């Protein structure tokens, strides 16, 4: 594993610091996702004449995709050891596979909460993010990266 150093502290083998940093990465990625969802749902896509279900799903997909890119890059810098378990092309393929599955979970939960249970979309987005973060962490840690 390549050395991980932050503010002059080597935390390469310190799992506690990595978990704290993963929570930071995930937390900021969630904020990015929620902000983008709000922007797409309430501002950018609202005038396109989409029904509530379609608007919810499109805003969810766009916000999830962009926040996944943010999470991937920041996670590789601070937490995971990119390229140490698989070559870069296989790693990237696995990240896309896991992300597509995560997006599927996101869309499924958003449809369930908003379309079937009539929850307020922003509340549904926050709850959905909390559920899907478990999938994201476990799949990246177990199958894609060494941490």
Image (tube, rainbow, N blue to C red):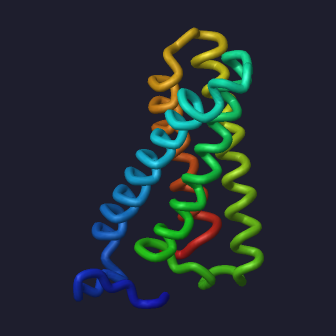
Q: Quadrant of residue 48?
A: top right
Residue 27, given in percent of the width and then of the height, sits at: 38, 50
Count of picture labels? 0
Instruction: Give the side of residue 74 with respect to residue 49, left or right.
Output: left
From the viewer's side, name the closer residue of 65 and 109.
65
Residue 58, given in percent of the width and then of the height, sits at: 70, 34
Relative to 83, residue 43 above or below: above
Q: Residue at x 74, y 57 (%)?
A: 97
Relative to 69, residue 110 above or below: above
Which residue is at the far left? 8
Which residue is at the far front? 47
From the viewer's side, name the closer residue of 143 and 76.
76
Residue 28, given in percent of the width and then of the height, sits at: 39, 53
Q: Residue at x 47, y 26 (%)?
A: 122
Instruction: Give the side of residue 14 with respect to residue 48, left or right.
Output: left
Residue 14, given in percent of the width and then of the height, sits at: 31, 76
Q: Residue at x 62, y 27 (%)?
A: 109
């Amino acid at each position: 594993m390549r050395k991980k150093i932050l503010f002059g502290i080597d935390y390469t083998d310190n799992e506690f610091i990595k978990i704290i940093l993963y929570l930071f990465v995930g937390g900021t990625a969630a904020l990015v996702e929620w902000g983008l969802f709000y922007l797409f749902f309430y501002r950018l896509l609202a005038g396109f004449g989409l029904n509530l279900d379609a608007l919810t799903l499109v805003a969810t997909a766009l916000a999830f995709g962009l926040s996944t890119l943010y999470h991937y890059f920041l996670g590789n810098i601070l937490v995971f050891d990119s390229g140490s378990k698989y070559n870069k092309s296989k790693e990237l393929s696995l990240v896309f596979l896991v992300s597509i599955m995560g997006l599927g979970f996101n869309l499924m939960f958003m449809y369930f909460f908003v379309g079937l249970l009539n929850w307020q979309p922003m509340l549904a987005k926050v709850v959905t993010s909390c559920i899907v973060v478990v999938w994201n962490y476990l799949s990246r840690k177990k199958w894609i990266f060494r941490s």
